[in-house]
Image (cartoon, helix red, strand yellow):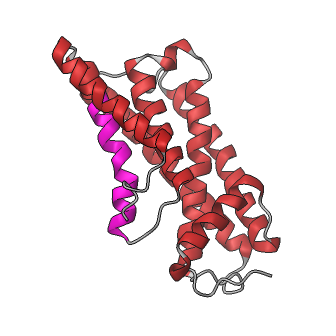
Amino acid sequence: MSDLGNANFLTRLIWLALSLSVLISLALGRWSLAFVSLATLVLSFTPPLLANRWSLTLPRPFLLATTLFIVGSIFLGEAFDFYERLWWWDLFLHGFAAIGFGLFGFLFVFMLFEGDRFAAPPLAIAYISFCVSMMMGASWEIFEYGMDQLFGLNMQKSGLDDTMGDLMINFAGAIFASGSGFLYLKGGRGGLVGSAISLFVQRNARFYRRFRKD
């Protein structure tokens, strides 16, 4: 079964709400809301479709987390102006994204070693995970700039100050995620991030053939 078909109830409910938002906005002639709703819906389908394309199994919590992030950053952030209404909204999303990017980087690098915890020093894998998270955070800032310039949005808010604040939050989130990955490699710990790593590895065991639990 594809990851789209394996989505939990809450994820399906979000997709349904976005679909209704598109239809209602078109009926009412609210073109900007229809565009934002459709863009959010399409982007929320991207992670499971990519996972299916690469023969990966995306656990339900991962799918829900990516969907909530996309809805929070685009639909709620832009259509309902959460960035202006809640001063901490942008910082929260960037911290959440940084942890997610760090987790993604860790899982990707760990996959390259087929789950062998002894093939590369845990510190090296954690460092690469940190770099991946920072790279993706910087890429998001470029995306925000492009959206502001092309579509007249206000994703960057105060310009340079907003960008640097976002990057510092991204730095903290990347440290947290890569540090959790390091602890996981050293002794199977790592808190919530460590639990997420274990879940993903279990669901995609064929890509982590050399992984052995102590």
- Camera-side residue: 201 or 94? 201
Q: Nearer the viewer, residue 208 or 117?
A: 208
**Residue plotted at (54% across, 60% down):** 104
Residue in the picture at 66% in, 67% down: 198
Left or right, 67 with reference to 153: right
Tell me if 62 is positioned left or right of 70 in this view. Answer: right
The residue nearer to you, when weighing 162 against 34, is 34
Decide: is 128 above or below 74. below
Residue 41 on the magenta span: yes
Q: Residue furthest front?
A: 9
Residue 121 position, x and y percent, is: 72, 79
Where is residue 39 drawn, in percent x and y?
29, 35
- Mostly what secondary structure, the magenta segment? helix
Q: In screen coordinates, is 138 left or right of 20? A: right
Identity of the residue drawn at 48% across and 61% down: 58
Q: Nearer the viewer, residue 145 or 126?
A: 126
Name the residue located 53 percent from the left edge and 69 percent from the top edge.
108
Please say whether residue 70 is visible from this viewpoint: yes
Quadrant location of the C terminus?
bottom right
Task: Classify residue 144 by image quadrant.
Answer: top left
Q: In the image, is residue 48 above or below residue 77? A: below
Confirm whether residue 154 shows in the render: no
Q: Is residue 69 magenta?
A: no
Q: Which residues are magenta?
A: 36-54
